[in-house]
Amino acid sequence: MSRLRIFADDRPDAPLSVTHDHAAIADALSTIRVDFEQWRSTQAIQPGDPAEAIIAAYQTDIDRISAERGFTTIDVVSIAPDNPNREAMRAKFLDEHLHKEDEVRFFVAGSGLFSLHVDGKVYEVLCEAGDLISVPDSTTHWFDMGPEPSFVAIRFFQQPDGWVGHFTGTDIAQRFPRYEVGQMA
């Protein structure tokens, strides 16, 4: 179940608010210019389906958002708990960083935890299957896929070089809870 927790950035132990309601999540995130949508596939997809089948299942929404925002490249990333590189992959995103383009992810399956650091608050967004999150360029954030990552996501890019993180050098991400599947009530 998707969830939003909002914290003061100096109080990682005490959320100011918590909601699992998609409309409430979208409303709260819109105040910081983050889009949060729900998508449904137009055809059945199965774990292990090729990227082309996954993209075809969401083609209408992909075309809409690409036209609205000028995305030139999309890809599908799939990470399973037994991936031998999972620790290195997780570590790559755990420190606070920003991008020079919007970071847009649609979760086809599984889950991941985005933490957005904006105006003295941390917006912790648990994204699950069917969730699209769009983090505006220059928004500081970090992403945790958990110690046993399990997700399939469609990624959208405006620049051909894809994911480029600009790290802030702060330790804020280490002070906030890590993502442990099953412990996210």
Image (cartoon, rainbow, N blue to C red):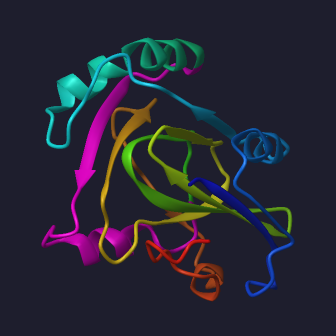
Indicate whether 177 appears above or below 102: below
**Horizontal side of residue 71 vs 51, given as left or right:** right
**Horizontal side of residue 97 vs 49, given as left or right:** right
In front here: 55 or 92? 55
The image position of residue 4, as x and y in percent, is: 70, 58
Residue 9 position by quadrant: bottom right
Query: The N terminus is located in which quarter?
Result: bottom right
Query: The C terminus is located in which quarter?
Result: bottom right
Q: Residue at x 49, y 74 (%)?
A: 179
Q: Residue at x 60, y 79 (%)?
A: 173
Q: Residue at x 80, y 45 (%)?
A: 24
The image position of residue 168, as x and y in percent, is: 60, 71
The image position of residue 170, as x and y in percent, is: 63, 81
Q: Residue at x 39, y 22 (%)?
A: 72
Residue 181 position by quadrant: bottom left
Residue 172 part of the magenta segment: no
The image position of residue 80, as x and y in percent, is: 21, 61
Indicate whether 78 appears above or below 42: below
In front here: 8 or 81? 81
Residue range corresponding to the magenta coloring: 69-97
